[in-house]
Image (tube, rainbow, N blue to C red):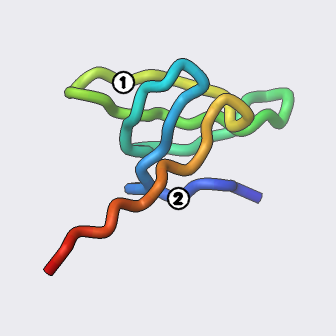
């Protein structure tokens, strides 16, 4: 089961924040995600990502 959905904001293990644009499985069954940051795509394993904290804005 996928941990993240398309459009989720995530942090990588290197501290980069991006948006999930695609999710897929390798032939071995490992879950991968394509994460966009500033127009560039990173392809990362699920265990290298964590949910980004939600920022609450004052109204």
Q: Which residue is mark 2?
A: 5
Outermost residue toward the front in this view: 58
Residue 59's disc is none
The residues bearing labels 2 and 1 have C-alpha atoms spaced at a distance of 16 Å
25 relative to 43 in the view: left or right:
right
Mark 1, secondary structure of its residue:
strand
Q: Give coordinates of residue 51: x percent, y percent.
A: 56, 50
Above or below, 45 relative to 31: above
- The answer to which of marks 2 and 1 sits earlier in the sequence is 2
Mark 2–mark 1 CB contact (< 8 Å): no
* Position of residue 3 in the picture relative to residue 52 (left or right): right
- As drawn, 9 above or below 13: below
The outermost residue toward the bottom is 59
45 relative to 56, above or below: above
The spot of residue 15 in percent (x, y) is: 49, 25
Q: Which residue is pictured at 38% across the width and 56% down the height?
A: 7
Q: Residue at x 44, y 22 (%)?
A: 42
Reading the image, the residue beneath label 1 is: 41
Residue appearing at x 14%, y 80% in the figure: 59
- Depth check: give the residue in front, 48 or 40: 48
Q: Return the residue nearer the eye: 2 or 59.
A: 59
Give me the residue at 55% from left, 37% from top.
33
């Amino acid at each position: 089961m996928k941990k993240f959905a398309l459009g989720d904001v995530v942090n990588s293990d290197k501290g980069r924040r991006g948006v999930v644009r695609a999710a897929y499985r390798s032939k071995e069954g490992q879950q991968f995600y394509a994460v966009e940051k500033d127009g560039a795509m990173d392809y990362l394993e699920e265990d290298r990502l964590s949910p980004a904290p939600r920022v609450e804005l004052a109204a």
